[in-house]
Image: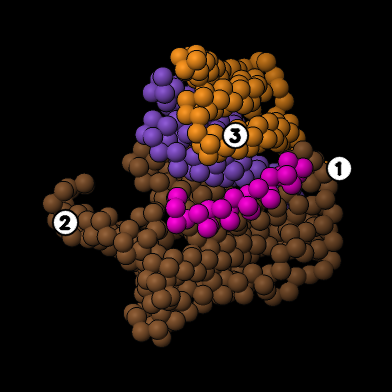
Chain colours: A orange, B purple, C brown
């Protein structure tokens, strides 16, 4: 049972690491802002969840697990919200998703109305 | 295992810093910083476990909250920044004419 | 913006050095508040500096000389982590060995900060209070124009309807942030934390509210004169604890005489002064933010008005 738990926790940590590194590569290599945002925003929450769950299994101790659960919940709330706000702000400032590499950049700034 | 995870997170943080430096638009930088914040939370948790001091989790909690607040603040000010610059540009244009 | 990263980085550095409390402070102050305040300042002043024709050669020479002297001074200082350094010979062992018996607080840093070095901390609190007073004096707008208010209100509501998701999530989060601030405040005896950090976290929750729901709404909830009063009350609480201990026959800020049992007295004293510190820090941060943001709004909407 003990080895099983440590195996599962190791698996969680490892997959979290792989995802994290792939999201980092995505952040560096993707051509424009929205694809980068996709790479980061999607993977970030899952990475956090996986690693925190892995840590929870490492040390099943009351207060530590409680704190980890609180952190996990907060991340689950915060991360998508921040990504949402960021994407919304970007699209409102006129940053259009273009797949041509050179055409990106700040478009027309439309002040937020309506 | 924990050490490997820590190193992986450090590598990702480094990537985020790179993107933050070269990021062509302002939003890229904010995205990088946001990612950096979440990764720092994870790093602090992991370090706490590596060193066997679970008090670090408090810091991680503060971090998660604070980085959210600062991202929101930055976005807010970028918005008002753009509006202000527009106003200025319009004014200057009128003066030039 | 990358300043925030610097804050995060240095906090991880402190974590790596096992300095929990310092990392905590850096996390809350360096990454959160200072970034926000810097941004508000930039928003007030504009991004580019005015070109100045004044060449401060004299000042440069002065700075170089003083910097050189300081570097020369550090040469005499013991190496980092040097075991024979004076601080490590006399002071630290006493703190480490005796604080459990003398203070009875598990967190060593809190014991040193609040009890052994209570006077220094008092000075820090006074400095923060002075900063708040300075900002109020310098940036205090005498009276706000009402016709401006309505317009700002309109723009704010239109702007904030777009942030619907963020608003709702923040509404859920803010109580937790406030609760967490109190946890940090009163848990400072046992874990990392204390008045400074708690004050900053509390203030950042209020700032988050003000950012998302508009300044005027926040101003309706948070009574400005009350906050200004609180910042003074914090300093007064700290100082009066010292005075009371003096009246009870001890030294200034010597909490052992506050109660019949010295340990209980220390606990009471530390709790009270941490409360004072938290009060002052939170209210001063809120004051500074509100003054800056007020200023920004007043400047920001002026062009629109004149047109």
Q: Which residues are magenta?
A: C167-192
Please give the residue where the numbered disc 1 appears in the rendered image.
A114
The residue lying at 57 percent from left, 45 percent from top is B66
Q: Is residue A47 above or below residue C119?
A: above
- The percent coordinates of residue C111 (x first, y second) are 37, 60
Q: Position of residue C11 (x, y in %)?
A: 43, 43
Residue at 57% of width from left, 62% of height from top?
C282
Chain that bears disc 1: A
- Discs 2/1, front: 2
In what element is the residue under mark 3? Answer: helix
Q: Which residue is mark 3?
A: A69
Q: What is the chain identity of the residue bearing mark 3?
A: A
**Could you tell me which quadrant the C terminus of chain C lies in?**
bottom right
- Magenta span: predominant SS is helix
Question: In terms of depth relative to the viewer, which is nearer, B83 or B63?
Answer: B63
Q: Secondary structure at mark 2?
A: helix
Q: CA distance from mark 2 to mark 1?
A: 67 Å
- The verdict on residue C173 being magenta is yes
Residue C40 placement: quadrant: bottom right
| Co-location on one chain, circles 1 and 3 | yes
Q: Nearer the viewer, mark 1 or mark 3?
A: 3
């Amino acid at each position: 049972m003990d080895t099983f738990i440590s195996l599962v926790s190791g698996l969680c940590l490892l997959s979290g690491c792989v995802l994290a590194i792939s999201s980092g590569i995505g952040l560096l290599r993707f051509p424009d802002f929205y694809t980068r945002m996709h790479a980061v925003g999607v993977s970030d929450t899952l990475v956090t969840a996986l690693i925190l769950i892995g840590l929870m299994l490492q040390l099943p101790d009351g207060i530590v697990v409680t704190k980890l659960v609180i952190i996990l919940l907060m991340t689950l709330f915060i991360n998508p919200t921040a990504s949402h706000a960021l994407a919304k702000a970007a699209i409102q400032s006129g940053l259009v998703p273009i797949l041509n590499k050179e055409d990106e950049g700040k478009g027309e700034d439309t002040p937020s109305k309506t | 295992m924990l050490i490997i995870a820590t190193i992986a997170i450090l590598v990702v943080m480094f990537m985020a810093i790179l993107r933050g430096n070269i990021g062509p638009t302002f939003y890229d930088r904010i995205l990088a910083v946001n990612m950096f914040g979440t990764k720092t939370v994870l790093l602090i948790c992991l370090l706490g476990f590596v060193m066997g001091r679970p008090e670090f989790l408090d810091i991680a909690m503060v971090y998660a909250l604070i980085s959210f607040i600062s991202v929101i603040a930055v976005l807010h000010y970028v918005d008002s920044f753009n509006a202000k610059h527009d106003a200025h540009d319009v004014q200057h244009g009128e003066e030039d004419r | 913006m990358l300043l925030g990263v610097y804050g995060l980085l240095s906090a991880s550095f402190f974590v790596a050095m096992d300095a929990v409390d310092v990392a905590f402070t850096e996390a809350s102050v360096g990454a959160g508040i200072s970034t926000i305040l810097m941004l508000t300042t930039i928003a007030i002043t504009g991004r580019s500096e005015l070109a100045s024709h004044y060449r401060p050669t004299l000042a440069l020479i002065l700075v170089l000389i003083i910097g050189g002297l300081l570097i020369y001074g550090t040469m005499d200082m013991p190496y980092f982590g040097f075991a024979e350094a004076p601080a490590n010979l006399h002071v630290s062992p006493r703190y480490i060995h005796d604080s459990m018996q003398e203070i009875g607080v598990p967190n060593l840093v809190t014991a040193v900060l609040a009890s052994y070095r209570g006077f220094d901390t008092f000075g820090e609190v006074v400095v923060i209070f002075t900063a708040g007073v300075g900002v109020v004096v310098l940036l205090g707008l005498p009276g706000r124009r009402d016709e401006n208010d309505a317009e700002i209100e309109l723009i704010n509501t239109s702007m904030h309807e777009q942030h619907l998701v963020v608003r709702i999530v923040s509404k859920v989060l803010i109580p937790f942030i406030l609760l967490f601030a109190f946890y940090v405040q009163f848990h400072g005896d046992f874990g990392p934390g204390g008045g400074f950090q708690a004050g900053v976290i509390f203030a950042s929750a209020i700032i988050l509210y003000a950012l998302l729901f508009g300044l005027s709404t926040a101003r309706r909830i948070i009574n400005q004169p009350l906050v200004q009063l609180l910042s003074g009350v914090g300093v007064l609480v700290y100082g009066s604890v010292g005075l009371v201990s003096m009246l009870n026959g001890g030294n200034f800020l010597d909490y052992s005489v506050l109660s019949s049992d010295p340990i209980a007295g220390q606990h009471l004293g530390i709790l009270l002064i941490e409360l004072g510190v938290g009060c002052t820090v939170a209210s001063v941060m809120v004051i500074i933010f509100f003054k800056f943001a007020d200023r920004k709004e007043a400047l920001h909407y002026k062009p629109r008005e004149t047109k």
